[in-house]
Image (cartoon, helix red, strand yellow):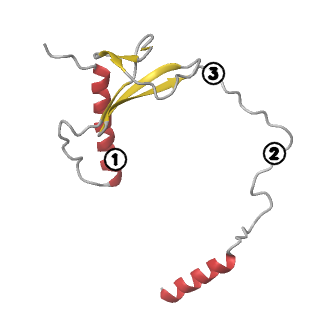
Amino acid sequence: MAALVNAQALQQVLRRLDQAFDRRKKLGAGFPRFEKSGRMRSFSFPQLGKAPLRDGAVKLPGLGWMAIRHSRPYPEGFTVKQARVVKRASGYYVMLTFRADIVIPEPPLVGHVVGVDVGRTVLKMPLERFWRGVFCTLAKIL
């Protein structure tokens, strides 16, 4: 029986293909290369569901519980947002993205705010003599 592939993982692959075509248009380059089946080194799971972590394992949609080795402890008060499975020469790795539901307040404006460009018409550079020599040399060449 063939294993079902997570629909969101397939959508991420299509999103990467769409980004490749957008870059092609933007840069004026040719079509993206045809990729062999083993060429893509990573795929992501944008949603992992409820409680995807337990001691030494992560639950990936469509794959089930996979054993992992912790490289660092999970941060307290954070929830898992997404996972990316990466294939490297030394094996497979799972990168977890965490999210915290905290609000960072805007810093209050205190006192009179002054911009950087107040009253300056000419910007003095510390290496003014150096740049003057560069521009003179360029003028002689051109």
Q: Which residue is mark 2?
A: 113
Q: Quadrant of residue 37?
A: top left
User: Along the polypeptide, which appears first: circle 3 or circle 1?
Assistant: 1
User: Along the polypeptide, which appears first: circle 3 or circle 2?
Assistant: 3
Q: Which residue is mark 1?
A: 23
Q: Which residue is mark 3?
A: 102
Q: Position of residue 24 (x, y in %)?
A: 30, 49
Cα–Cα gap, marks 3 and 1: 35 Å
**Which residue is more in the foreground, 101 or 85?**
85
Q: Residue at x 39, y 17 (%)?
A: 58
Q: Residue at x 38, y 22 (%)?
A: 68
User: Along the polypeptide, which appears first: circle 2 or circle 1?
Assistant: 1
Cα–Cα gap, marks 3 and 2: 28 Å
Q: Is residue 1 above or below residue 43?
A: above
Secondary structure, mark 3, is loop
Q: Residues within 10 Å of mark 2 (few under 14, many from 20)?
A: few
Q: Residues within 10 Å of mark 1 (few under 14, many from 20)?
A: some
Q: Is residue 135 left or right of residue 5?
A: right
Q: Residue at x 45, y 25 (%)?
A: 70
Farthest residue in the bottom direction? 140
Q: Position of residue 119 (x, y in %)?
A: 80, 61
Q: Is residue 79 above or below residue 108?
A: above
Q: Quadrant of residue 53?
A: top left
Q: Position of residue 61 (x, y in %)?
A: 32, 16
Q: Is residue 126 left or right of residue 13?
A: right
Q: Amino acid at mark 2?
A: Val
Q: Amino acid at mark 1?
A: Arg
Q: Quadrant of the N terminus?
A: top left
Q: Is residue 5 left or right of residue 60?
A: left
